[in-house]
Image: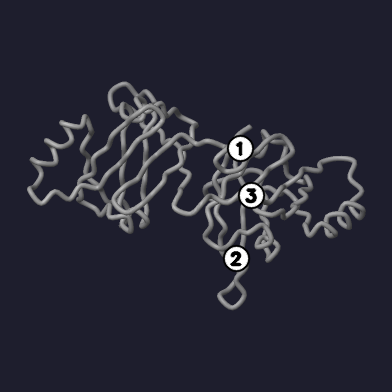
């Protein structure tokens, strides 16, 4: 069982915009979704289910049964783009709305062999994979937390601003600091509460926060993990991903 993060994207011209969800990655091969296979998509209340049919399929019967349930059939094909070459498939159309999804929604996909369940991530939460940090002198890989995008600025984490980072088992809390007494008082605050103090950087025009290996390791985050980021103004709380929280 693995989990993947997806987004409901735009498809088509401005006069005829439709929702679109794309699946691609090595994990599709592991789950049996190979080029040429047939995928049945069924929209259900609060989720979409994708079932694999790769052999002994009577297409007309499956098509009719799927249509009666409000679903659609999709073929897996080989994607050949600059960043990826391998199996993938795309679902697009207004049937996506039947699952309660809308444009811009972040989705979490529970993937097992022959079946993918997709659910919406609740408002105010982001699902982010643990990043890979390469140690400068040893070349070893260590877990790290990497947050970037315009959403950070909306939460008050503007470039140049200081943030206090507090690791705890299974959790990292990042708090924007705005001490009117200046940098020294922020340093004292961080030391007194056993926090790390970092500065929000800028990357490709967007704020960027990176919490490097030791802090992520102390929180128990490991490479391959996901964490759920609960956000409010001036505060980001990162917790280990719990499938039960999202109805899986």
Upstream in sequence: badge 3 or badge 2: 2
Upstream in sequence: badge 1 or badge 2: 2
On the image, numbered disc 2 is attached to which residue? 11
> Residue at the spot x=87%, y=54% of the render?
65
| Label 1 secondary element | helix
Upstream in sequence: badge 1 or badge 3: 1
Res 104 label: none
Question: Could you give the CA–CA distance between mark 3 and mark 2, rounded to whole angstroms?
Answer: 17 Å
Which x, y percent locates residue 3? Answer: 58, 38
On the image, numbered disc 1 is attached to which residue? 26
| Label 3 secondary element | strand
Question: Could you give the CA–CA distance between mark 1 and mark 2, rounded to whole angstroms?
Answer: 24 Å
Which x, y percent locates residue 76? Answer: 72, 48
Q: Is residue 94 left or right of residue 227?
A: right
Q: Do the residues labelled 1 and 3 touch (CB within 8 Å)?
A: no
Q: Do the residues labelled 1 and 2 touch (CB within 8 Å)?
A: no
Q: In this view, does 194 lie above or below 105?
A: above
On the image, numbered disc 3 is attached to which residue? 79
What is the quadrant of the N terminus in the image?
top right
């Amino acid at each position: 069982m693995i989990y993947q993060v997806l987004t409901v994207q735009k498809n088509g011209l401005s006069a005829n915009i439709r929702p679109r969800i794309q699946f691609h990655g090595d994990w599709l091969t592991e789950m049996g979704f190979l080029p040429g296979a047939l995928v049945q998509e069924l929209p259900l209340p609060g989720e979409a289910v994708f079932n694999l049919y790769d052999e002994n399929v009577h297409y007309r019967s499956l098509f009719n049964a799927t249509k009666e349930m409000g679903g659609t059939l999709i073929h897996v094909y080989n994607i050949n783009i600059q960043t990826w070459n391998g199996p993938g498939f795309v679902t697009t159309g207004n049937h996506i709305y039947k699952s309660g999804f809308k444009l811009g929604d972040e989705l979490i996909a529970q993937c097992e062999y022959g079946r993918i369940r997709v659910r919406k991530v609740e408002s105010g939460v982001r699902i982010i994979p643990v990043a890979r940090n390469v140690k400068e002198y040893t070349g070893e890989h260590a877990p790290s937390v990497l947050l970037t995008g315009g959403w950070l600025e909306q939460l008050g984490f503007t470039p140049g601003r200081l943030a206090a980072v507090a690791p705890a088992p299974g959790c990292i809390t990042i708090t924007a600091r705005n001490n009117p007494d200046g940098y020294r008082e922020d340093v004292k605050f961080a030391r007194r509460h056993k926090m790390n103090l970092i500065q929000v950087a800028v990357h490709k025009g967007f704020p960027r926060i990176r919490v490097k290996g030791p802090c992520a390791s102390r929180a128990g985050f490991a490479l391959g993990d996901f964490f759920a980021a609960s956000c409010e103004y001036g505060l980001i709380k990162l917790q280990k991903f719990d499938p039960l929280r999202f109805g899986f």
